[in-house]
């Protein structure tokens, strides 16, 4: 089969634009950037500049800068009805971050979830209305849509008006190296540097309302005092929106002697692997996820998981985690306690999680994504 020239969104992984921090979309985009060449694709990254200027992105480290900002191109699409299109020297363009504009080549778009439209209360209030309007309208610019879970398909159809016949489900994954435990010395060094002790309860994700971290903290504080002395609660993630009350609660708990550690500057993937490997229980009862990559990372790291029984998370875990009502603090607390104290249950969840992670790799994600490209291009 002939090689496919792919243009790939790199705005969410461009160090000049992100400061080196990757959110879920960034992890996904980075995995495609690494994996597509081995699957027979020539890949060129494209990032939108922060300002409507060619020069504003001239110092980008990954790929090339788009000719104009996304805001300018989206407005041009709206005003011209797509009569003017971006001239791209690729066979197909893959938009991974909702920045979807009309091009002179087919466009595949990954729509991760529909949170801004289905649950605006969980989205950033800054420019919420205009951003929601833009997202809903630009979704129509894609020739084909990739959804990360079966759960998301219904959301995309209802919220964005996407024709279900133009949607393909491609699950996220983990790199094979995550399935192998890092050297114990490296784990110990990282944990010492971060000031945490092995066996802690762990959460990984941006601090924002839908991640449900407030209830994780409340559940942790409801555990027996002896367990809290033995096991810290380690929260890894940058401060997002509407998290001031959560941060105040965490600070107050620490001042009262509670063993809660917030790590907000972890950029290095290897150190993140060490943090997962040092955990005793992973806690991720998110209120809404289009997929939930951290659950898969915990599975691969050999850590038993507490997650939610809603949205896409049961589809990700397939019974390998303890699934609870994310609104029930008592249920979250009890699941945390069970996985910390019941060795038989821990081992059962660890084994099941490892099997699940081995089935969902980034290599599989890339292969299924390339199959979508070939279908769109008629190169099956």
Image (tube, rainbow, N blue to C red):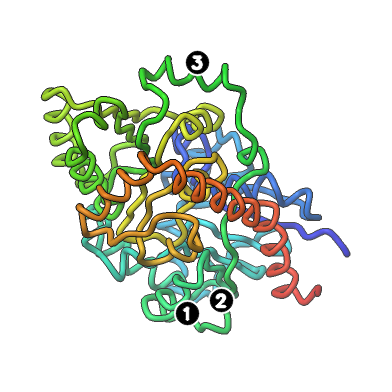
Quarter of the picture holding the N terminus: bottom right
Left or right: 134 with respect to 215? right
Q: Which residue is the site of mark 2?
A: 167
Quote the CA–CA distance across marks 1 and 3: 48 Å
Sequence-wise, which precedes: disc 2 or disc 1? 1
Q: Which residue is the site of mark 3?
A: 189
User: How far across and down, in percent of the image, does residue 203 sit?
Assistant: 36, 41
Left or right: 10 with respect to 361? left
Q: Residue at x 13, y 41 (%)?
A: 245
Residue nearer the viewer, 364 or 347: 347
Quote the CA–CA distance across marks 2 and 1: 8 Å
Using a 10 Å C-alpha cutoff, classify the residue at mark 1 as few (fewer than 14 neighbours), some (14 to 19) or many (20 or more): many
Q: Residue at x 48, y 19 (%)?
A: 190
Q: Which residue is the site of mark 1?
A: 162
**Cβ atoms under marks 2 and 1 closer than 8 Å:** yes
**Cβ atoms under marks 3 and 2 closer than 8 Å:** no
Q: Residue at x 45, y 70 (%)?
A: 152
């Amino acid at each position: 089969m002939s090689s496919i020239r792919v243009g790939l969104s790199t705005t969410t992984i461009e160090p000049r634009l992100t400061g080196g921090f990757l959110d879920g979309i960034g992890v996904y985009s980075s995995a495609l950037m690494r994996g597509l060449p081995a699957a027979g694709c020539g890949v060129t990254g494209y990032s939108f500049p922060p300002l409507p200027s060619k020069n504003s992105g001239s110092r980008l480290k990954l790929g090339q800068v788009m000719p104009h900002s996304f805001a300018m191109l989206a407005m041009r699409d709206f005003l011209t009805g797509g009569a003017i299109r971006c001239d791209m020297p690729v066979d197909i363009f893959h938009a991974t971050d909702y920045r979807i504009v009309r091009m002179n080549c087919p466009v595949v778009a990954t729509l991760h979830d529909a949170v801004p439209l289905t649950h605006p209360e969980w989205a950033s209030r800054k420019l919420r209305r205009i951003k929601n309007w833009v997202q809903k309208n630009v979704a129509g610019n894609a020739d084909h849509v990739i959804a990360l879970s079966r759960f998301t398909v219904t959301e995309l159809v209802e919220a964005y008006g996407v024709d279900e016949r133009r949607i393909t489900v491609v699950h996220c994954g983990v790199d094979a190296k995550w399935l192998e435990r890092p050297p114990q010395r490296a784990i110990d060094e990282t944990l010492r540097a971060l000031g945490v002790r092995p066996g802690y309860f762990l959460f990984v994700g941006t601090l924002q309302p839908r991640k449900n971290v407030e209830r994780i903290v409340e559940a942790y504080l409801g555990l027996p005092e002896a367990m809290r002395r033995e096991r810290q609660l380690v929260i890894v993630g940058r401060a997002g929106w509407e998290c001031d009350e959560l941060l105040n609660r965490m600070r107050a708990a620490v001042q009262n002697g509670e063993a809660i550690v917030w790590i907000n500057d972890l950029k290095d993937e290897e150190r993140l692997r060490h943090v997962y490997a040092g955990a005793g229980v992973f806690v991720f009862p998110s209120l809404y996820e289009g997929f939930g990559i951290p659950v898969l990372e915990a599975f691969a790291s050999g850590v038993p998981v507490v997650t939610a029984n809603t949205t896409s998370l049961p589809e990700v875990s397939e019974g390998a985690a303890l699934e609870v009502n994310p609104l029930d603090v008592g249920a979250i607390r009890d699941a945390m306690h069970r996985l910390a104290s019941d060795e038989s249950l821990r081992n059962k969840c660890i084994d099941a999680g490892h099997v699940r992670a081995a089935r969902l790799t980034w290599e599989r994600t890339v292969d299924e994504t390339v199959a979508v490209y070939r279908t769109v291009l008629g190169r099956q």
